[in-house]
Amino acid sequence: MQKTRHIKPVRFIVEVGILVVIFTLVQYLISAGLLNQYYQINLASICINIILAVSLNLINGFTGQLSLGHAGFMAVGAYASVIMTNYMELPFIVGIAAACLAAALAGFIIGVPTLRLRGDYLAIATLGFGEIIRVVLQNIDYVGGPAGIMGISKMTTWPWLFASVVVTLVVIVNLINSSYGRAIISVREDEIAAELMGVNTTKYKVLAFVVGAMFAGLAGALYAHYFYIIKPETFNFLKSFDILVMVVLGGLGSTTGAVIAAIFITVLTAALQSFPAIRMILYAVILIMVMIYRPQGLMGNRELGRRTFGKVFGSLWGEEK
Amino acid sequence: MRIRRKVSMVVLMLFVLSIVAGCSQGGDNGSAQQGDTIKVGINTELSGAVASYGTNAANGALLAIEEINAAGGVLGKQLEPLQRDCKSVADEAMSVSAALVGEGIVAQIGPLTSGNVAGSTRVMMENQIPLLAPAATAVNVTVDEKTNKVRDFIFRVCYLDSDQGRRMANFALEDLGVKTAAIYGSTSDDYATGLAKYFKEEFTSKGGTIVAEEGFVNGDKDFRATLTKIKNANPEFIYVPGYYTEVAVLIKQAREMGITCPIGGGDGWDSPDMVSVAGAEALNNTFFTNHYSVEDPDPAIQKFVEAYKAKYNKLPDSFAALGYDAARLLADAIERAGEADPIKIKEALEATKDFPGITGKMSMDENHNPVKNIVVIEYKDGNLISR
């Protein structure tokens, strides 16, 4: 015990150091013009997908509630932020805050009634709500109706992307490792047993749902301010499935798995661009292969982290038993 | 422990492999090198929601490039088409454009829908490489609505929805000689509501009267109730902007109810399914505006139709014709520019005058929209006849 506590600050400094190195390295590559536009776009996609996958993993993987409406929350965030920045001409930070708040609120409104449902019923209800958000946006002329909003200023930069990913990871990992997280996981493991133990299951389900939705909103804001155009069709249920594929591929209940899968799928999609005719077939075949050989996902419900890297860094890291 | 390390190794290897694969894709860094070929990007929707549009337009463009190369290429060089799929989503269109720019293209053809073109727009503008949109009809594709400034490097080869609606209004007033009309169009998309809006504007401003205005939603199957209302208003002409899926059924039901007046629509009607669903007889006395007609006896059009049929074993639709025209217009612009330099090509595209396309003679206006004639096609006993 004593030893671990003694080592912790060192570990913290090392971790922050690694983050700073990654950040400055990429920032240097961008400003030195070594990273061309194509890589920058894919880097942005990777960051946005990491946020989406990790936040959906909180709902689907850790809480065990099958939600199929993640793209809906992303849409809420995207539109809320664009209204702030493009229509009212407020700074990007306001747009991001509005996106998070609006999506969290939407998550709350949708979560409270639907999270009393279980399994398939919840999946269908969230799918329905995701579609409702899309159809409602389609019918609001203020935000361009079905044509959406075009010509959004590019405000999402590497520092924003990096900071967002780090905040998402820190918040979600710490949430899971807290007592709230234990309660959330207990809901997944056995809802009845958790309830018998005095865990207010609905409360924790709603909590996970709201936090997940909030980060989806953040991803939506980053997306809108990078890709120039948003329209309701972008956030249809297929987008939700794309995110779900990342979560399942990475392993339900593994944050590092979600990160790896988000990177893997984004890079895979980009790499297959050169084979237009067989692209979707290859994509599907690769997914099927992974699911045959790793039915629990790439990482299962394990994490790649301190314990694995501990072997490499040994004493510096401090072995956890 | 050992198994876990193995697993992590496999994961890491997959990861590294995929990154390596990704890297080989990006290619050289931005330098548009002048090799033996002129690289042209074809960035269209080959999968996803509008895959059929993108596939046909890409086929048309590839056919044109093949013909141009067979005839000696452009400026003594062969055109090299680089075909990519944007999955019918805007962010993918952007990423594909960036990859193509990295590979040194001098211009890009596609994507098809306005939204996906918008995704591509910023990359093309930042790198100053022209984009030819075969079928994007939204006004703000080429003009920034906020500042009213033209997007310098974005061009289109199709006409706008507004032109189409106006054309049909004039056709109804002048050629058919009607005074009253009813509008019964789809309310589900911008395309149909746009056509209805401009038809109404033009029709009323030229002295016509709209006696009824109704709408349907894409996916509707029964139009009889609304048609009864329209029948009672007794219009001389009915304008039905929408897609063939609903329109074919709608016309069939209208004729069954004894509505005999002429019915008109837009290019969404263009499909062989019209005749098979509505029946040849019901379609008599119906008209729609379109980009071109497969039946047009013009030798250039017939040559294209034959070549397309020979290569792809199906009839070219409007998207194929527009893709074909986009590639040919681009080749023509490169020829006129004198060298394969994106900025010179852009200037040449702006100066386009009376380019003889399959879809009509085009001249670029100051907003990068082509000024061209719009064909009105009549169904006569199941055949398409251009008016």
Image (cartoon, helix red, strand yellow):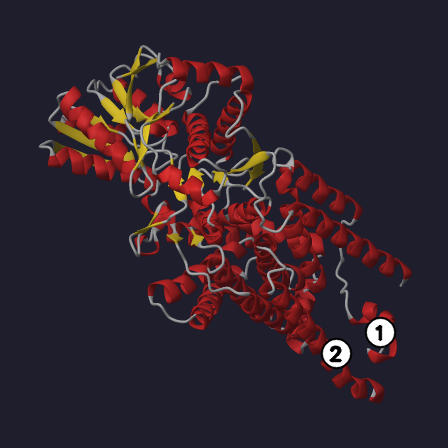
Disc 1 and disc 2 in contact, CB within 8 angstroms: yes
Q: Residues within 10 Å of mark 2 (few under 14, many from 20)?
A: some
Tag 2 or tag 1, which sits nearer the N-term? Answer: 2
- Residue B224: quarter of image: top left
What is the three-letter code of the residue carrying label 1? Phe
Give the chain of mark 1.
A
List the single residue furthest toward the right: B2
Q: Compared with residue B173, is residue B151 higher up or lower down, i.e. above or below?
A: below
In the rendered structure, find residue A56 and report the number of the disc placed on it.
Answer: none
Answer whether residue B113 is visible to the viewer in this image.
Answer: no
Residue A136 at x, y = what percent?
38, 53
Q: Residue at x 56, y 39 (%)?
A: B85
> Which residue, given by chain and number where applicable, does mark 1 sit on?
A313
Q: Is residue B379 left or right of residue A209?
A: left
Give the chain of mark 2.
A
Q: Compared with residue B12, is residue B296 higher up or lower down, i.e. above or below?
A: above
